[in-house]
Amino acid sequence: MKKSTLLLSLFVTAGLAFASISTLKSRSVTPRRLSTADPVTQAAAKRITANEIPAKAMTRNFVSQHCLACHSGEDPAGYLSLECLTLSNSEMDETELWNDVAETVSQGAMPPKIHHSQPTPEAVSHFLSALQKRALLKRQIAQPVASMRRLTRQELENTIGDLFQLRSPLFHSPDSLVLNDKYFQPQSRRMPNYMMVFSHHEWSHRNPSFFENIPALPHDPPVEHGFRNNQTGISFSPLQMERQFEFVGSLLNHPEFQRSSAIWSELFECEYAAWNQQLKYGEQQLDTFIPRAFRRPANPVSKQRWKHLFQEQLRENRNYTTAMKTTVQAMLVSPSFLFRTDRLACSNGFPDWSIASRLSYFLWGSMPDETLFLLAAQGELKNQRTVRQQVRRMLQDRRARWLSTSFGMQWLQTMKAISSRPDENLYEHYYQDMRHSLPGVFMAIEQMLLFETILVENRSILDFIDADFGYLNQVLMNWYGLDPQSLIGFIPKPEDTEDFFRIQWPDRKRGGIICSGATLVSTSATHRTSPVFRGAWILEVIFNRPPPAPPANVPELASELAHGSQPLNIRERLAIHRHDKNCAVCHDAMDPPGFALERYDAVGQLRVQYADGTAIDSKGAVSGITADGIEDLKDVILRQQDKFTQGFVEKLFEFAIGRKLDRSDLDTIEDLVETAQQHQLAFQNIIEEVALHSVFPESSARVPQSHLSSRPQNHPK
């Protein structure tokens, strides 16, 4: 059948499903307003409106008294005007703006300490409570009908691999960083002391697929301060559907796919010669395949359409394999396959299947396995105790490495280390000593292995801040100025760059994510360090409080002579930059944490002075608390571990639910933070609680787990 004819047939076959999903998507974007026709609904609307009036008055009064003096007029501070928040009755439509205001006020950053009118702690508390109350009321008034989004590229690759039980992955994905992951054995609850880690990042660009000549799928764009699975950042166009169609067709007809798929012979081959027997056998296979592909029980009408398509293809081609390939190809560009419709499945009477998908895509980035499908079919996943048990089982599966390659690497912004290119004239040794065409790869692997160790060994998340262990190869040992003989007892061969060893750091100048090479290189400018980039990284990654993006017309830092005599160092140049009140709004928060890392140069090596011989001043601050150097910086953050824990939990929960958080999620976050502290911040226990809250968002009651919770293998320092 010609491609155009087949596509037309597909659109007819999947048209009803696509139309219904498109309708749901549009409805999910447009809030559902309370109907005025129903008297009960009218009463509810009046009650909500009445409750909202005091909250509106509180927010307007607070902004008027403490914010408008600076944030109004033609030249508002920080280029941010808040006048609109006191004028409109639909203020809560400015959700993101209100979130930013609430975060800034809650951190004590605003109003500035020099402001003539400082609010009392009680006023701040009432203001934040009013904002949260209004956010909750807004969610009652405007609740999305259904939440749905397209599978990301990585989720699509994983799902196809599991659906067809492929023995090898589809692509050398750059995001996965390494080719071999045999070292990752979570069921052992211990990462090995030695492992061979082969990077294929550069190879993945030259030869992206394990199957030769398979067209690559486009990468999903990153979401600012978020994750690629955020439903607001994932689009799907007719061109993407056509590319998906071509990709699936090339895959199903590839000889290597036939050899790699464990279900090929069962699904695509038929031993019967008679046409009616082939038809019956094919329909039986579709009865099994359709609910697995669509991850929920098949609608009888929809199932009959797919069977009819198979029957038409079998009648036209007189070849079972060709007919089944064509049918499966059409199914894999169907919205029912390409889109995650977890909430839709729940509202249509399949809550267990919805829970199965939400768990599997959170923890594995792929479709549910047979155990989850069976429990869903039996109606067991509505039981929270069962869900807890499944989360623990899934974390012992090798597919849980998804949390490292997707959540971990996006949270830590690991891949930026690989794309960073320090000036080759200033840092020639970086490219020579690392002995790799992409020097940052080794640093990225180091950071990835740290994440995986904290995950597998259920260690405290405080190890992200100040771990006393790490994984290095001989290149990184030399780069960090460490003696391999004292660390591992011998000196590895120079060519054995794939050998990574678990080491104990000799001091606190290394260890954790803040002073890792990957972070230090990726947060530097090409020709110097950047306290601004490093401070912004700390605010975003450590505390999940990213500063706003700079306006387009920000001037360059002053780089000429100061007063015609002395060169300006980076601290002096930034001080001049902060003289502008619009710049100071953000730089007063970003610069101080970054200054504490000034003893690391732009390629992550320790230094005792600047290149011109002047002394380095590493005095900085976090949340107004002074920190001189990395050891002090770690101590200050550890003393504020509640803030780090909240930021980490927020990031993980956002990744689990696939959307940005808002003020109405505050109760859930507080619940998660409290539970995390009860479990001594053990990573797997935090994942378990996040998973439970993400699949039972409507329930505040939790199953008692004192006898279920595993003890962390390592206690926080």
Image (cartoon, helix red, strand yellow):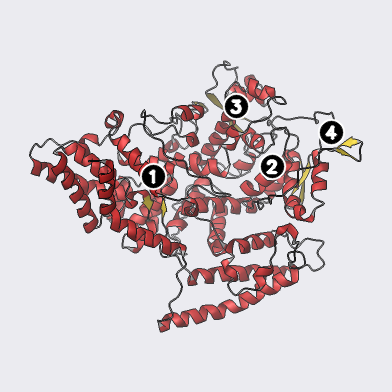
Give the mark toward the camera: 1 or 3. Answer: 3
Give the alpha-carbon distance from disc 2 to disc 3, as whole Å: 20 Å
Choose top left, top right, bottom left or bottom right for residue 426: top right
Residue 615 is labelled as 4
Figure quadrant of the C terminus: top right
Residue identifier under label 1:
366
Residue 439 is labelled as 3
Where 381 sits versus 267, above or below? below
Q: Residues within 10 Å of mark 1 (few under 14, many from 20)?
A: many
Q: Earlier in the sequence, mark 1 or mark 2?
A: 1
**Secondary structure of residue under mark 1:** loop
Q: Earlier in the sequence, mark 2 or mark 3?
A: 3
Q: Residues within 10 Å of mark 3 (few under 14, many from 20)?
A: many
Q: Residues within 10 Å of mark 4 (few under 14, many from 20)?
A: few
Give the alpha-carbon distance from disc 1 to disc 2, as whole Å: 34 Å
| Residue type at numbered disc 4 | Ala
Residue identifier under label 2:
534
Q: Is residue 487 visible?
A: no
Choose top left, top right, bottom left or bottom right for residue 430: top right
Contact, CB < 8 Å: mark 4 with mark 2?
no
